[in-house]
Image (tube, helix red, strand yellow):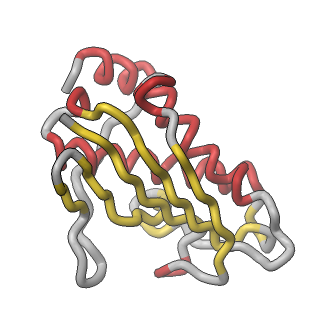
Amino acid sequence: MSTTFQQRLLALGITLPPVGVPAAAYVPFVRTGNLVFVSGHIARKDGKPWVGQLGAGLGTEEGKLAARAVAIDLMGTLQAATGDLARVKRIVKVMSLVNSTPTFTEQHLVTNGCSELLVEVFGQEVGAHARSAFGVAQIPLGACVEIELVAEVQ
């Protein structure tokens, strides 16, 4: 891993996890040409799904922490896909699903937990990305947040 990324992660107290085993019939990532598509990762807390619904027991700040946790898992999978985060040329797109009540409207703020960490680790030029954030009625295993990403790599 690039010294820059390693130093940033170390300074943030982050250790990237190994790639998780898919819970269904899919692969953790697919590389085609210079793009890596990372499958959706659910929020985990203490190794278990971070269960809950935004607007019904979970607030925006906790959702933001859950999205940050997802970003760490996504980077672990991205590292496995590339062999070295220094090969990441750009985080292209992030898509976030937020398990939320019909009246909860801060999905974009929840998703900032992921987006802000990606920019903090990769820097503005590489980490800034296009993004969508959706409120959904349910996510697998009752998780509060699921996020996928697309990255351009060397």
Res. 27 image quadrant: bottom left
The quadrant of the picture occupied by the N terminus is top left
- Observer-nearest of 24 and 129: 129
Total labels drawn? 0
Instruction: Check the image and name the residue furthest to the front.
Output: 33
Residue 149 lies, with reference to residue 98, above or below; the image says: above
With 85 as the anchor, is 65 left or right in this view? right
Residue 82's x, y, as percent? 17, 42
The quadrant in which the C terminus is found is top left
Q: Nearer the viewer, residue 29 or 139?
A: 29
Q: Position of residue 101 (x, y in %)?
A: 77, 77
- Vertical relation: 140 (above or below) 65: below
Tell me residue 87's x, y (percent): 21, 31
- In the rendered view, does 83 fall on the left or right side of 62? left
x 54%, y 78%: residue: 139
- Would residue 94 be found to the left or right of residue 29 on screen? right
Question: Would you say 32 lies left or right of 146 here?
Answer: left
Q: Name the one closer to the observer, 100 or 29.
A: 29
Q: Residue at x 22, y 21 (%)?
A: 2
Give me the residue at 45% from left, 57% from top: 46
Quadrant in the picture for residue 114:
top right
Q: Position of residue 36 (x, y in %)?
A: 26, 52
In the displayed orientation, state which residue is furthest to the left. 83
Q: Residue at x 78, y 58 (%)?
A: 106
